[in-house]
Structures are given as structure tokens and as C-alpha cells.
Amino acid sequence: MNCDIVPPFSGGCMTVRQRIRKMALSKALDKYCRAVSVHKRGHLQEFYRINVLKRSVLAEKNMDEITSVDIACYRDARLNTVSDRTGRPVSANTVRLEMALLSALYNLARIEWGTCTHNPVEHVRKPATSPGRTRRLTSAEERLIKRALQNKNSQILAIFQLALETAMRQGEILSLRWEYVDLHMGVAHLPLTKNGTARDVPLSWKARQVLKEFAGPVSGPVFGYTSNGFKSAWRTLLSETGIEDLHFHDLRHEAVSRLFELGTLNVMEVAAISGHKSMNMLKRYTHLRATQLVSKLDARRRQAQKLATIFIPYPAEIEYKEGQYLLRFTDLDHSAITAETREEAVLLAATSLLRIQAIAARAGKRLPPPGEINVRDPGRILINPFVTKESISAS
């Protein structure tokens, strides 16, 4: 860094004035790419952004000559640009990321390179944040993709199914190695993820079956696709099936949403599976279907309906013998109930039936369905598990 020595203003010590080093933005972007971007996990994405910026009208200007007005003009021009790849206007998020890169470059250059004295990006209004994609994979699309891949490309089919079962990112699936997959324990280890940390992904039964069918050597990559090769194959698949506006990353949205829709996992457990560090980021992935929310709202009613199918009346045989009433359920395995009065026998039978049904429900067992009863047979009676003394008297 070059400095000029200038005289003090009023008898004080000598002051130092920084001389600005002239550097074109294009040269600064190249230097930033070599010094900073190459060390990032997302260096390829930054490389693309740097190339976009180098093609702009800002590129040939010196860094210290670029003003906030220039940055604002760049922002507006980019928002009105149609992407050659998608045929749609460049998204607000894309422009935000390009401006963020420029801002990081200026902060570094101001402190370490001496090519500017301030950051012109800092106070320029950023494009509004997009609400994020809410694209869900439909069941019809899922069947269509599976049918298209069934006998054509087993690798992409396996990758597609793993994405839906594990919520792994495309890069994480493509980088899977057999030495990090334990099908016995049901865990896939990811030594390095987008967040820069390792993660163990639990494999569902279906995910384990997919990998078992695809089982390969003890070590080495599970899949043979590169990132660019897979992207090309995915675009071809969508073209052949006629499915529109479905990004592979949408499958991660779908998988996380399905994890929430299970109703058995809390937010932290879903985050442990998906690898999200920010709860706010995780929230935007949980675009639950309205029908699923209706189901949750009606959960209490469905629980009551489920109980109603468990605690149902059962027929029993009743007879008076040697001064006592004997009662036995014809469809259930239990000891005979004895009582001095018919009313007492029915109440004891109801209590016994309720207990039998509750024990079966807790154990997850299914009782045999109740048989038919002949209402004209005085020796047969229908026992309601919720019968009361008052209801017997009233009848």
C-alpha cells in the first residue's frame, strides 16, 4: 500500500494519507475469485456470478470511481434482463446474490487492497426477497417419473427415490460413497455438506431397499453421475415426461414437507434429518398441503371415530343356574361371569368387556369381530361396554 506523508495542521504529529490504488472492477473480481471464492463450498456458483459482473458496464470502471448510483443502475438493468437459460426475467434473489458478492468484494478491497475507501453497495436498496418456491410434486408426476425411469435409467430412479425419502440435496446424493453407507444400521454418513459440517442421514425402509437393489462395492461412489451430467439428464427427463417447472431441489422441499406431514417428528428432528441449521430456513420448506392440515384439524374427531370402532358391543350367552346368573361372551376368550342378579351380571360383563378391549387397544391387537345375535333368543344378550345401571333400569 502506498502512502503520502503530509505536514501536520497545527504542531501535532505527522499524519498519513492513503493513496488509492487504481484497479478495474474486472481485475478485482479475478483477484477475489483466486483469493476468496476458490476456498468456498459454493465456489462454482460464485464463479458464474463473477462472470456476469465482468460482462457488465461496471467491469471496466475503477473500483473507486463506481458510485451507489452505478450500483442502482446495475440492479435495475439486471432485473429487466431475460435469462438466456430459462427465457424468464432474472430473479430478484439472483440480483441480491450478485450485489452481496460485490459488497463482500468492496469490504475486502477497502481494508486489504486499498483500491477504494468506501462500499458503494452498502446503502443501495436490494430487490425485495422472493417468497420462495412452493412447488410440490404431485402424485401423478411421481408415478409418471417412476414409469419413465423404470426400465430406462435405474440410477436416476434411485437418485429420485432417495431425494424423496431422505431430503438430501442433489450434491449430497451424488457424492454418496459406499464406505459411508451402513444399510444394517440404516444410516448414510455425509462427511461434508453445504453447511460445511458432517451429517448422518437416517435411511427409511424404502431408502434402504433402493440402496440394497443398487448395492455395489465396499468402497467407491454409489452413483456415476457428475453434477453437470445429472442436470442434463434431469432436463431430458422433464422434457420427455412433459412435466413443467419442476426443479430437482423441489424434491427436497417435498421430502421435508412429507416429514412434517408424518405428524411424528418435531422441528428439531426434521432439522437433524435435512441438515438445516436455521429454523427460519426450515420453515419455508414446510408448505403443507391444505388437505393435510384439514386432517390435523379433525384429528380429535378421527380419534373419537377410531375409539368408536374399538369399544363396540359384543354378544354374550346368559343363563340362570343354581341361583346365579352365568354370562359368557361367545366371541372372546375369558372366564365366565357370575352374579346373583341379571342386572349385576350385565354390569360386570360390561366392565370386563371394556377392560378386554382397552388392553387389546394398548397392545395394538385386533379382537375378533362380534358375531350375530338372535334377538328372539332369551339366552343371548348384547353387552355394551359403556352400559350403566340407569340404562339397564330404563330398559
Image (cartoon, rainbow, N blue to C red):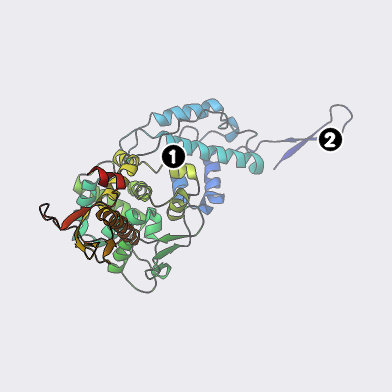
Circle 2 Cα neighbour tier, 10 Å, few/some/many (<14 / 14–19 / ≥20): few
Residue at numbered disc 2: 14
Residue that sits furthest to the right in the current view = 11
Q: Is residue 96 left or right of residue 232?
A: right
Farthest-out residue, front: 323
User: Mark 1, residues whose alpha carbon is within 10 Å: few (<14), some, or many (≥20)?
Assistant: few
Residue 100 versus residue 325 in the image, above or below: above
Write down the quadrant of residue 326 in the picture: bottom left
Q: Where is residue 78 in the image (x, y as percent from the top left)?
A: 42, 31
Whether residue 196 is situated above or below residue 54 in the rendered picture:
below
Q: What element carries label 2?
A: loop
Amino acid beneath label 1: Val
Q: Residue 279: where, in percent of width, then height?
A: 49, 45
Q: Which residue is drawn at 39% across and 38% down?
A: 132
Residue 43 visible in image: yes
Q: Answer left or right for 149 relative to 251.
A: left
In this image, 35 relative to 88: left or right? Answer: right
